Amino acid sequence: MRWQALSSTDAKLEVMAKSRSVQAPFTLVVGGDAFLNAQCMHDLRNAACANRPDAELIELDASDCDAYAFDEAVGPSLLSESSIVVMTHLERADDRLGAAMEAYCKQNNGNGEQASLVICQHEGGQKGKRLLDKLVKAGADRQNIPDLKKFDAKINFVYAMMERNGRRIEAAAAQQLVNVLGDDTGELAAMCNQLCFDFDENPIGLDTANTYLTANPQVTGFLVADRAVEGRTADAIIAMRSAVEQGISPIALIGALALKLRMIAKAAAIKSGSISQAEAKASPWQIRAASRQLSGWTSQGLGRCIEALADADEQSKSSGGDPVFALESAIELLGVKGRQAR
């Protein structure tokens, strides 16, 4: 399988067939998200082994590999006429090893069927960039891995994972997965696979996704915040108290509530023209969702709610305070959009 960014402006990921033939004698897997980088290396190695079952698999680390060890690895041996050499940490290769690799790449460019295959992993960055450029000039196939830093790129990664399993997922469920697990692509991929394995529904909905996420404080915080903003104050307080009884810290819930208010404040600022969407540093989906919840909010109301959450945060961090009561008061104020009682 190969992950590939479709363009600089399009964060979608294309999932290539697992059985992709590895024809180039020399392949470079460069940078990007660490999980996708490792996944691409894994899939290329498996494809190479499947295409050349008689070849010897040799794994090397450029950190402690020298030119002689590389030449030995790519040359014929008693076990096989050719080999599959998997090299990690290419950015740490010394000059002599780099020169040996460049010479091999030049010599075997175009001889994919006869030559030993070399698959190299580079973590990205400037270190080792000159060697990368030399190897590409010598004929190596460079595969740049996307970094998945943007929210929309992570959403598209979830869609791609579901497609890989022959499944679909609702937008709200995909967004929830990214909200909670988006900082760890490996966990995000594992959750997508687990949901597809455990549930038959297609598309997978938000309630199903939350089945495995309810123990996460951020999910509970989003749930509490959504119910409060919708005016379902009693439901929000019940959900909050239930979470606290299950061991979720009030501070974690306060953080999720504060994030909800910040998004509403950013949506209001964009609507008024005070800031641009780029300056808000939030995904278009987050701004759209917050914009739908703007009705009834005022600057004063937002300010009061933020102050109430700050008070709850202080109560949580000081001895003798009552953080649950302070959090409940903040939820009640949020439920009426910060309006003061008359």
Image (cartoon, rainbow, N blue to C red):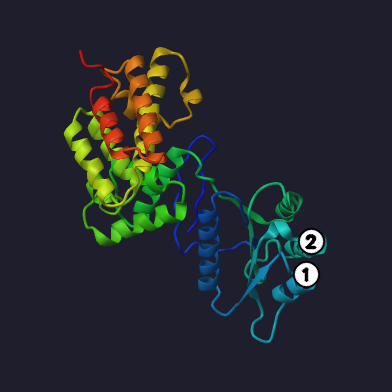
Left or right relative to 324: residue 143: right
**Residue 80 percent location from the top left of the image:** 64, 82
Of the pair 332 and 270, the residue shown nearer to us: 332
Out of 88 and 43, give the one closest to the viewer.
88
What is the quadrant of residue 192 in the picture? Answer: bottom left
Location of residue 216 with respect to 94 vertically, above or below: above
Q: Position of residue 269 (x, y in %)?
A: 42, 18
Q: Earlier in the sequence, mark 1 or mark 2?
A: 1
Q: Tell me the quadrant of the picture where the C terminus can be found.
A: top left
Judge whether residue 79 can be spotted in this image. Answer: yes
Q: Residue at x 71, y 65 (%)?
A: 62
Amino acid type for the residue under numbered disc 1: Asp
Q: CA distance from mark 1 to mark 2?
A: 8 Å
Seen from this angle, which residue lies furthest front?
320
Q: Nearer the viewer, residue 150 or 68?
A: 150
Report which residue position mark 2 lands on.
Answer: 94
Who's the residue at 38% across and 32% down the image?
Answer: 258
For the residues labelled 1 and 2, say whether their Cβ atoms are less than 8 Å apart. yes
Q: Which residue is mark 1?
A: 66
Q: Residue lying furthest bottom in this view?
A: 78
Q: Which mark is residue 91?
A: none
In this rendering, does residue 286 appear at all?
no
Depth check, front residue: 91 or 233: 233
